């Protein structure tokens, strides 16, 4: 079965959407499309509180890519929650930072998104056109004989085109690293997180992402009247632990809570808890207005923390190996602007268009890489510089965004430039152009 179609390593949203885009207008040498994923089938239901995956926000770029497949965006919408605001909470104050509430993003659990994409593939195409294999870990890729090895296959799998969509710890990328001329950088980012699933508190709007920074010391004292009092507490370096968490609405009045910390700002008292009842009590005291079930508390305590990495490659293709990288395998970045998933979906859209419009496979993957390296490096730069690094500048940053949102209602764009967040999430303006507009 030599030279057999497309093999996609990684069955996350990017790899699955690429399969849809290729199959929508197939070329014979790209069939069949075979997808291999190390995780279990996302179509097998599990309770939400047992999921360690957080919500992704599909903004204009993600919607643009998914909408290229007829009827697919409508199916995705049904499993998500539209959000039109980003609200910062500090003390008793809350500050909405979204500029254009008429252009919502769609929040959806990553596993739910993958389940829809898999289900639609199975519904629309035969097994002769597409195969989706789960619980198949990639062991290695061989660019010399154009094969990929998996732990559940007795023999290597041949390919005509290999796509590495296998995330930040990509096995396919390991073969790229062995090739001459491939420049690769990987940096461990200082952020670690765990995910908690709870019922949405009535006090939190269902159409907004809410972010909190709470000090356990402040919880023991009377509420301060000072805006951004949690930042004041942080700067004064008094006792207590600071907990940072973001709350993302989910269907059926649920909420996915991302609890994040750095090595220098660990909520040690929270991380030391081993009892579900003690964890429940801690959250409800120090992380209002959240309320936690014992089942969700137990699942959280048993969850392995996730660390973030930044990945940067000088090219996303290898001609001799007939291989390309997409998504986090090519360009993992900070989640500060919420563009990780959106930029990945744009990768596969650009790649599919190149494969469709250029008969020569080598030229197609080279053109894809030339465009997306520039764009994805620009997206990473914007994400890394989304917020000021110094803590004392954060209050001024937030007040500046509030002022910009207010003045934007009266001043035209030539006078007041749209915020970077708005340009990235609400438009299809190239990331590289966004940088030029703000420099």
Image (spheres, rainbow, N blue to C red):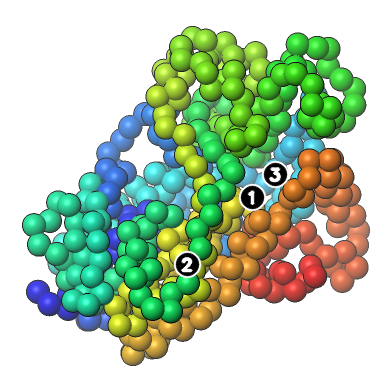
Give the mark, 1 or 3, whose residue is nearer the N terminus.
Answer: 3
Q: Which of disc 3 and disc 2 is earlier in sequence?
A: 3
Q: Is residue 98 visible?
A: yes
Q: CA distance from mark 1 to mark 2?
A: 22 Å
Q: Examine the rendered structure and indicate whether residue 186 appears above or below residue 438.
A: above
**Which of the two residues, 366 or 179, is positioned nearer the viewer here?**
179
Q: Residue at x 47, y 19 (%)?
A: 297
On screen, residue 196 above or below 71? above
Figure check: 437 above or below 49: below
Q: Secondary structure at mark 1?
A: loop
Identity of the residue drawn at 66% across and 56% down: 384
Seen in the image, is 122 located left or right of residue 360?
left
Residue denoted by label 1: 336
SS class, disc 2: strand
Q: Residue tagged by mark 3?
A: 85
Q: Which mark is residue 184?
A: 2
């Amino acid at each position: 079965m030599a030279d057999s179609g497309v093999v996609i390593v990684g069955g996350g949203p990017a790899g699955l959407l690429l399969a849809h885009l290729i199959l929508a207008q197939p070329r014979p040498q790209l069939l069949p499309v075979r997808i291999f994923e190390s995780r279990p089938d996302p179509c097998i239901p599990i309770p939400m509180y047992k999921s360690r995956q957080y919500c992704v926000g599909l903004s204009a770029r993600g919607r643009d890519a998914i909408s290229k497949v007829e009827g697919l965006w409508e199916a995705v919408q049904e499993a998500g929650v539209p959000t039109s605001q980003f609200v910062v909470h500090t003390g008793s104050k809350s500050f909405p930072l979204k500029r254009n509430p008429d252009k919502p993003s769609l929040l959806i659990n990553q596993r739910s998104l993958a389940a829809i994409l898999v289900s639609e593939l199975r519904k629309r195409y035969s097994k002769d056109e597409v195969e989706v294999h789960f619980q198949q870990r990639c062991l290695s890729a061989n660019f010399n004989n154009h094969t990929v090895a998996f732990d559940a296959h007795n023999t290597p799998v041949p390919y005509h085109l290999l796509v590495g969509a296998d995330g930040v710890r990509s096995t396919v990328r390991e073969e790229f690293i062995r090739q001459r001329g491939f420049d690769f950088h990987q940096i461990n980012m200082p952020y670690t997180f765990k995910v908690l699933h709870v019922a949405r508190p009535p006090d939190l709007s269902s159409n907004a992402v809410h972010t909190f920074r709470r000090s356990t010391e402040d919880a023991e004292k009377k509420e301060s009247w000072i805006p951004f009092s949690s930042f004041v507490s942080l700067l004064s370096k008094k006792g207590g632990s600071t907990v940072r968490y973001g709350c993302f609405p989910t269907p059926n009045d649920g909420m996915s809570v991302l609890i994040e910390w750095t090595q220098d700002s660990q909520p040690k008292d929270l991380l030391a808890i081993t009892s579900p009842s003690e964890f429940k009590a801690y959250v409800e005291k120090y992380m209002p207005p959240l309320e936690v079930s014992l089942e969700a508390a137990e699942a959280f305590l048993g969850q392995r923390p996730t660390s973030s990495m930044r990945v940067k490659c000088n090219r996303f293709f290898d001609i001799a190996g007939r291989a390309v990288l997409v998504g986090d395998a090519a360009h993992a970045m900070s989640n500060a602007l919420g563009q990780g998933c959106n930029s990945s979906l744009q990768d596969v859209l650009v790649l599919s268009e190149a494969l469709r419009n250029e008969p020569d496979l080598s030229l197609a993957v080279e053109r894809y890489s030339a465009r997306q390296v520039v764009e994805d490096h620009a997206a990473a730069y914007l994400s890394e510089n989304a917020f000021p690094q110094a803590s004392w500048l954060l209050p001024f940053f937030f007040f500046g965004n509030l002022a910009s949102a207010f003045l934007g209602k009266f001043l035209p764009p030539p006078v007041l430039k749209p915020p970077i967040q708005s340009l990235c999430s609400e438009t299809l303006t190239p990331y590289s152009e966004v940088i030029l507009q703000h420099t």
